[in-house]
Image: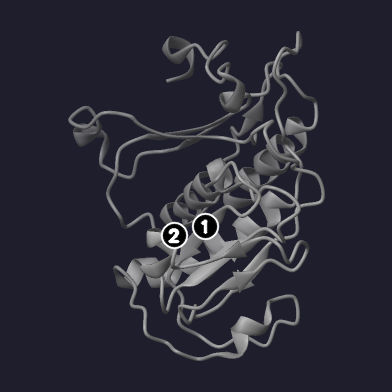
Amino acid sequence: MAHGCYALAVTTQTRETTNPQETAHTNRTLAEATFASPLARELAEDVLQRFLRYVRIDTQSKDGSETYPSTAKQLDLSRLLVGELREIGLQDAHLDEHGYVTATLPATLPPSRQGDVPVVGFIAHVDTSPDASGTNVKPQVVRNYDGGEIVLPGDPHQVLRPATSPALREQVGHDIVTSDGTTLLGADDKAGVAAIMGAVRYLHEHPEIPHGTIRIAFTPDEEVGRGTERFDIRTRW
């Protein structure tokens, strides 16, 4: 569903909200869903806010383009991510001439043990599908979903129905993010981007957690089959 006008991303939240930007569904306080772990609870709001910020940036790629990346607007999010990575503390964050964002989260293991573990890569793509508009995305947050139909406000003909969506039926008590029905949402793969950024921030703030070197990369043009066309893993990792 990520390519369609009513794409969903789901987080597990259980609190009330008074944010006027959120839909009328947010007035309900079911508080039925549980988090997978205390860490998931701690990261959830940061990841959600990042996701809402990223989906508002139009990063649609283009089939048949002769440039790389295929659209310059993908770089708008890439530049933002470089800035946020540096704010977190990853000072080697860099955007190259091909539109790849890379950064390094140094190992916290003792030097004598770092050779015992592999370098791990966190990778996601910033572009969204050419199949539906990515311009002026207006994300809607449905807090504590109650199991009913969700009418998308930008196009009331777009209705998410649990009767026809088994995945939706399973999300009662969770938070759901949708577009307003006039555009795609961009959960593919901005949900991944937001999750990586939230994880990197948390790990950087908690050096007591032992881990090896972590490399971060955000690529363009995955949706048009060119995401790794100029990504040289030998020099980047």
How far is the residue under mark 2 from the one under mark 1? 14 Å
Q: Which mark is residue 217?
A: none
User: Residue 215, located in which quarter of the rendered image?
Assistant: top left
**Residue 117 position in % (x across, y down):** 22, 32
Return the residue nearer the eye: 1 or 31: 1
Helix, strand, or loop for circle 2? loop
Query: Is the residue 230 above or below the residue 2 in the image?
Result: above
The residue that disc 2 covers is: 165
- The residue under label 2 is which amino acid type? Ser
Q: Residue at x 64, y 44 (%)?
A: 86
- Name the one closer to the observer, 131 or 233: 131
- Judging by the rendered image, the residue that carries numbered circle 1 is 9
Residue at horizontal 64%, vertical 36%? 128
- Color style of the picture: one colour
The quadrant holding residue 112 is top left
Closer to us: 24 or 93: 24
Q: How many marks?
A: 2
Q: Residue at x 80, y 26 (%)?
A: 72
Relative to the observer, which residue lies in front, 157 or 134?
157
Q: Position of residue 20 (x, y in %)?
A: 75, 82
Q: Quadrant of the C terminus?
A: top left
> Mark 2 Cα within 10 Å, few/some/many (few <14, many 20+)?
few
Question: What's under tag 1, amino acid-wise?
Answer: Ala
State if disc 1 and disc 2 touch (CB < 8 Å). no
Residue 99 position, x and y percent, is 68, 23
Q: Position of residue 146 (x, y in %)?
A: 48, 82
- Residue at 37 percent across and 85 percent down: it is 32
Name which of mark 2 and mark 1 comes first in the sequence: 1
Q: Is residue 223 above or below residue 77?
A: above
In the image, is residue 237 above or below residue 44? above
